[in-house]
Image: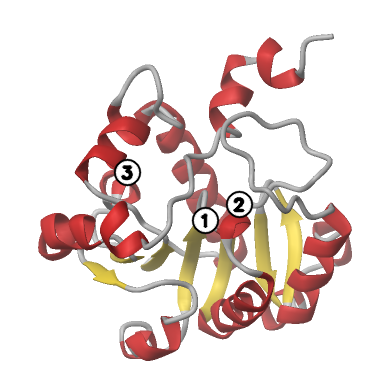
Amino acid sequence: RPSRAAADPLHAAMTTMPRPVPDPTQRYDAAYFERWYRSRRHRVRTPTEIARIVAMTVAATEYVLERPVRTVLDVGAGEGHWRGHLRRLRPRVKYIGVEPSAYAVGRYGRTRNLRQGTLATLPRLSLERDAPDGFDLIVSCGVLNYVAEAELADGLATLARLSNGIAFLELFSAGDDITGDVPRDRRPASWYAGVLAAAGWTPVGLHCYVPSHIAARMVALELP
């Protein structure tokens, strides 16, 4: 029986994840990004698909905040592909990308506001200075499934403290029908739900979550 991914090319594109590699500061090099971001054969998502997700997350954030998005934190930003899409929607948005790749930060750090770091090193980057009231939108795509359990729990808690709106936290569980290089340790959805809840996140659908202080002012049927 064909999987949903095989039957639905868009679903396959959205749920295909690039190959994880060791020592990301060096191994996420130019060839890696060429293969997984630009190659028509191997790329994870097309620019059109990225634009669609960006538009959805911006709309969701502005629905919750009842104002335009002003600040965005992108963890595992790659070459900062989200920045251009965000700027087309909200030209004045302040975008900060955190990325382990020395190549990506070296090439695009100045022009796309990328800083070298990982989920684990976020506390060292003093991001509170960039958004004293918290970030309106936090993004982490194609990253969190490859993070060790302790690092994931701590990192999600850090992101909750940095959030003043919505987070798009892309996660795929053991029960999901996905294609690509799937993580060896596939965790059940219940495990992820527990870690997210413990870190202070409440789901609002489509990989979107709100921190507890935002959830507290939402009405009952906006939440699960």
Q: Residue under circle 2?
A: 170
Instruction: State the image quarter where residue 23 is shown.
Output: bottom left
Q: Position of residue 126 (x, y in %)?
A: 34, 90
Please state the horizontal and vertical placement of residue 41, each as a whole percent of the image: 38, 17
At horizontal 68% and vertical 48% (from top left) the residue drawn is 184
Residue of label 1:
143
Q: Secondary structure at mark 2?
A: loop
- Pick the front one: 171 or 162: 171
Tell me if mark 1 has few (under 14), some (14-19) or many (20+) residues whose alpha carbon lies within 10 angstroms of its own: some
Q: Earlier in the sequence, mark 3 or mark 1?
A: 3
Decide: marks 2, 1 in contact (CB < 8 A)? yes
Q: In the drawing, does residue 53 fall left or right of residue 46?
A: right
Q: Position of residue 215 (x, y in %)?
A: 74, 74
Instruction: Please state if 208 lies on the left or on the right of 43 as rendered.
Output: right
Task: Identify which amino acid the numbered label 1 is placed on.
Answer: Val
Q: Is residue 124 above or below residue 11?
A: below
Q: Is residue 112 visible?
A: no
Mark 2 to mark 1: distance in Å?
A: 8 Å
Which marked residue is nearer to the observer: mark 2 or mark 1? 1
Sequence order check: which comes first, mark 2 or mark 3? 3
Q: Does residue 59 sit above or below 162 in this rendering?
A: above
Q: Which mark is residue 85?
A: 3
Distance CA(mark 2)–CA(mark 3): 18 Å
Q: Position of residue 129 (x, y in %)?
A: 32, 90
In the rendered image, the quadrant that contains the N terminus is top right
